[in-house]
Amino acid sequence: MRTKKMTETGPEQIGLPGFDEPPTPPPAKPGRSSPEAPHLSLFFALRPPPEVAARIGELAARLRGEHGLTGKLLAPERLHVTLRPMVDDEAQLESAMRAGASLVHAGLDVSFDRAISFPGSGAFVLRSSDNLPALGAFRRQLNLAMGDTEAQASRSATPHMTLLYDKHSIAEHPIEPIGWRAGEFVLVRSHVGFGRHETLAAWPLA
């Protein structure tokens, strides 16, 4: 399968029973030096097209206001659904590139109809009431391609999209469904704490 050339996106997002990146740390206080280098991580993900990301951003802003949340909204270009998080080292990167290129899969319908706060992480997210079984099947296929055992590949996770992080917990409630048909999946390097996602590769779903 052909791999799209490497690209880079600007400003970032990849817990819970799904997986998620930790929130971006606050700026260093005066008199304290900032870290010299970011913590790096890798993840496979699905990303909404720009027009859908913009609509999700508008929804996130509305929900933030309705619930009185104060956490910073993730920018539309940072919105994604994590498929598999990984450490960023040479072996994992090589395995991920091989696994991504080996997969053949139809496009995936991604739709969210619930909003909820995940306990512990502080993530306020969108999720689906049916847990997106087709996405789960694709994630299992991806895990197997990465060398997981059947048991490891089939471990449960909650597909979701993080909108922001906040100390207040919001109970699950319905929202007007919003989603898209994913035509590709991507491999991303996250510069955690620096607000940056670097797209390393993209593969079509068709």
Image: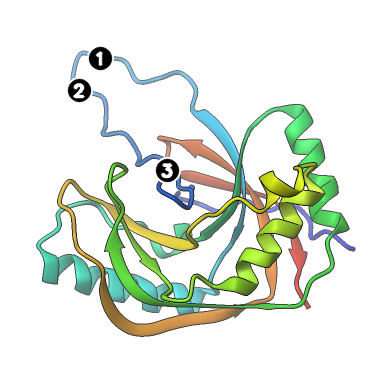
Choose between 130 and 164: the one closer to the eye: 130
Of all residues, the one furthest to the front in this rendering is 151
| Residue position marked by numbered label 1 in the rendering | 32
Q: Which residue is drawn at 52% across and 61% down?
A: 81
Give the quarter of the figure containing the C terminus.
bottom right
| Residue position marked by numbered label 2 in the rendering | 29
Q: In this view, does 80 lie to the left or right of 153?
A: left
Quarter of the image for residue 125 reads bottom left
Quarter of the image for residue 73 reads bottom left
Q: Which mark is residue 125?
A: none
Q: Residue at x 30, y 69 (%)?
A: 115
Residue type, mark 2 in image: Lys
Q: Residue at x 21, y 71 (%)?
A: 63
Q: Position of residue 22 (x, y in %)?
A: 39, 39
| Residue position marked by numbered label 3 in the rendering | 195
Q: SS at mark 2?
A: loop
Question: From mark 1 to mark 2, how far is it between C-alphas?
Answer: 6 Å
- Mark 1 or mark 3: whose residue is earlier in sequence: 1
Q: Tell me the crowding category of disc 1: few under 14, some 14 to 19, or many 20 or more residues within 10 angstroms, Cα based.
A: few
Q: Residue at x 45, y 18 (%)?
A: 36
Q: Are marks 1 and 2 in contact (CB under 8 Å)?
A: yes
